[in-house]
Amino acid sequence: MRFTRTSKALGMVAIAALALTGCGAGGGSNDGASQSAGDPNKVITAYSNEPQNPLLPANTGEVYGGRVVELLFEGLRTYDADGKPVNALAESIESSDAQNWTIKVKQGQKFTNGEAITAKTFVDSWNFAANSKNLQQNGFFFESIAGYADVSAVITEKSADGKETTTPAPTAETMSGLTATDDSTLTVKLAQPEADWSLRLGYSAFFPIPSAAMTDPKAFGENPIGNGPYKMEKTGAWVHDQSISLVKNADYSGPRASKNGGVTFKFYTDPGPAYTDLQANNLDVSDVLPSNALKTYVTDFQDRNSTKPVATNSTLNIPGYNPNFQGEAGLLRRQALSYAINREEITKVIFNGTRTPAKAFAPPVIDGFKENIPGSEVLKFDAAKAKDLWAQAEKIKPYDNSKPLQIASNTDGGNKEWIDAVANGFKNNLGIQAEIQPFAKFAEVLNLRKSQMLPGLSRAGWQGDYPSLYNFLGPVWASGAPSNYEKYTNPEFDKLLQEGLAAKSTEEANEKFNEAQEVLFKDLPGLPLWDQAKPIVWSENVIKAETGWNGGVLYYNITAK
């Protein structure tokens, strides 16, 4: 989970916090008395994969890099296990009109290199992130601030073959709505009132960065200096394609104090060997399980597993530049593909109930979730309907079946089995050949999508950045949005998002966001597949582990023997 933008800024609104119910195995070693006996100096080893980019907060938008950045840095706010925002570097965040905000920054805070963190640090960090010259994927998240359009401006040109190229062309170096009036006071003026703007400030795009990050971003990203509960073990702590080693930051005094001595992320390209390592106590915790273990992990790791519904979903994205899925015939084919997927069977047989069939473009745990959105009937399995729609498309424009329809996916996440099932559904119900296009690294899939070089479809997913219905729509599908890799655009969709952001209540906002989903169901730029109940398991070296509201492991809270 971003690049250059040409559309008008949309802003973001974070909706009320979630209440997630845990349902993992308990008892025994998970009680409070046992937790207090944990070893605070023990280093935890955890499942991961090679991050896509150097580790700058504003340029890290995928899960494997994100889990590292979130431990190395701390922002104005953070989120507790249930998604409730908690002040971290912010002493207070106030506004009388929801447009002009005053933020008091805690004094005495420093990066691990000793550099002080002041209000100006946030001004500099946010301007760096938003400026199009710096090519930070998450710059989009600052779009609500007055003056964002000036610093994020680009020139877009289209070549003879229809490919678009963008060139940074900011008309200002700083956002007019961002000011540090003294070392502890940050004032923010938004382009329009947004009552819940402050709730998103726990997302990594808003983290402060030291001056070294802006002087030499590439070098900094290889060995980042942060202010979070952990720091890089040493220079060279990131061994590419192998591991990243973090150690406890002894000077950290925020709300996420570490209960262990550090975290070493070990990179796997297949969850099978990782599962074996867990059973042999050679890996301590994993949030990715092989498909064949979903039926056995509770018994394989008795009293050492946890599962709960989280704000994470999966989709099958269809690039608009694929000729087979363009125009009237293309839309019919998109619908046919969706009807041909037996989500109910796949979530039961392959995922063993750790997924539930999607009913919308956002998961049920998000406040404002709505079932039976007009158009969502396309998510139901109907082989006859799928065949009929495909036949209608053939009459308009024949399908190019010279090659199998490829579905790009990383193989480390246990994706092959369900993609094979989806491909079989396409073959049996539509008469087309389909197959996985495998990649060892998730970053490779993202890079292929970013360069618009997908030969077919792509598996995708979204883990909530902050607890909001908008967060599952705007950053993913809005025109020019950071994770809108396939460059879907629809003015009506963008307009409804804008109206939701400007709404006076969260209820009114959610109504607009659900209307926006109706547009997505008409266009089907992607096919919602399923929502997650996140299982994690841990070794005998660990007393307890848990996930947060969005499925991310709370690594700082892991207690070890």
Image: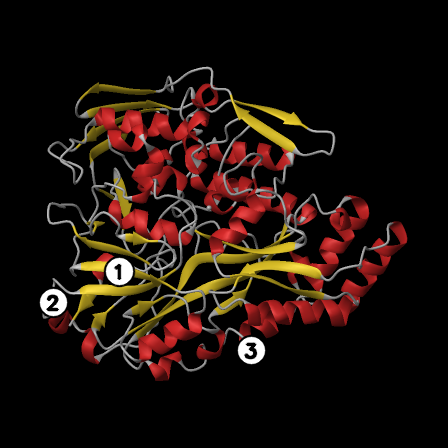
- Residue 471: percent from left, percent from top: 46, 44
Q: Which mark is residue 349?
A: 3
Which residue was labeled with disc 2? 39
Distance, label 3 to label 2, CA atoms, is 39 Å
Question: Percent from the top left, x then y, of residue 419?
Answer: 60, 67
Q: In the picture shown, does residue 442 fall above or below 113? A: below
Name above or below for residue 130 compared with residue 295: above
Where 155 falls versus 375 (above or below)? Answer: above
Query: What residue is rendered at 42% in x and 15% in y?
Result: 172
Q: Name the quadrant of the C terminus.
A: bottom left
Instruction: Tell me how far mark 3 sits from mark 1, CA to CA.
Output: 33 Å
In the rendered structure, which amino acid carries the disc numbered 1?
A: Thr
Amino acid type, callout 3: Val
The alpha-carbon separation of the residues under discs 1 and 2 comes to 16 Å
Q: Earlier in the sequence, mark 1 or mark 2?
A: 2
**Which secondary structure lies at badge 2?**
loop
Q: Nearer the viewer, residue 129 or 50?
A: 50
Callout 3: SS: helix
Q: Is residue 234 above or below residue 537?
A: above
Tally the marks.
Answer: 3
Question: Are the residues tagged 3 and 2 within 8 Å (C-beta)?
Answer: no
Q: Which mark is residue 264?
A: 1
Question: In terms of sequence position, does the residue under pointer 3 or pointer 2 come before the other?
Answer: 2
Indicate the amino acid at tag 2: Asp
**In the image, what residue occupies the spot 37% across and 80% down?**
298
At label 1, counting other C-alpha atoms closer than 10 Å, the crowd grade (few under 14, some 14-19, many 20 or more) is many
Residue at the farthest bottom position: 299
